[in-house]
Image: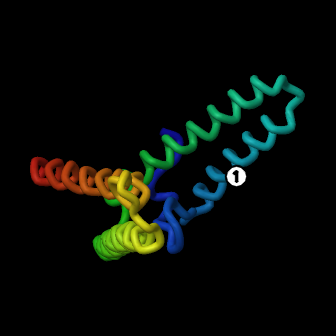
Amino acid sequence: MLGRPEWFTYRTAGWGLAPRTWQGWVYILCFIAAWVLISLAPLREDVRNALSFTIVGLLVIDVISIWAAMGRHHDERERLHQLIIERNCSVAAVFAVVAAMVYQTWRSAPTAGDSIPFDPMLIGILGVMAVTKLVSSIWLRTRM
């Protein structure tokens, strides 16, 4: 859309993109400047909120499209490193959710009416992760 994948690289800490070239820095600064100008503009609050939401939404959509295309613009070693990092983060997330379930089970004394002794949202999170992995696996197998 607006940004190009070759302007960015994978972030070392956290998720998202990090500027790699001066164009990447200009891209980020333009979005920040637009958001600051909207925040300081003498507009009604509902108009300011709508414009801020539009700018942030456009940035999120554009960053996702850049992120999706980055694999084609980085060398094989960078892609492999990013895959290993993402895999390790996924495994750590599963362990953290399971550990939270075990901890909540240990901390709560189950009563006769309780169906599960931990937050049911944790099951939902694991389910979303499992479905995402399944859909990604199927999609990749059909494309290769």
Q: As drawn, which residue projects farthest toward the right?
A: 42
In this orientation, which residue lies closer to the viewer: 113 or 61?
113
Tell me if mark 1 has few (under 14), some (14-19) or many (20+) residues whose alpha carbon lies within 10 angstroms of its own: few
Amino acid type, residue under disc 1 in the picture: Leu
In this orientation, which residue lies closer to the viewer: 73 or 139?
139
Picture coordinates of residue 143 (x, y %)?
13, 49
- Number of dots carrying numbers: 1
- Please name the residue that numbered disc 1 is placed on: 29
In this orientation, which residue lies closer to the viewer: 84 or 88?
88
Picture coordinates of residue 65 (x, y %)?
42, 45
Q: As drawn, which residue projects farthest toward the front?
A: 112
What coloring was used for the rendering? rainbow
The residue lying at 36 percent from left, 56 percent from top is 112
Q: Is residue 63 positioned above or below 39 on the image? A: below
The residue lying at 75 percent from left, 23 percent from top is 47
Residue 87 visible (yes or no): yes
Q: Is residue 45 positioned above or below 34 on the image? A: above
In this orientation, which residue lies closer to the viewer: 112 or 19?
112
Q: Is residue 31 positioned above or below 76 on the image? A: above
Picture coordinates of residue 1 (x, y %)?
48, 39
Where disc 1 sits, the SS reads: helix
Residue 78 visible (yes or no): no
Name the side, left or right, on which 36 lies relative to 28. Answer: right
Picture coordinates of residue 29 (x, y %)?
70, 52
The residue lying at 43 percent from left, 57 percent from top is 119
> In what quadrant of the picture does the C terminus appear?
bottom left
The residue lying at 41 percent from left, 52 percent from top is 121
Q: Is residue 47 positioned above or below 39 on the image? A: above
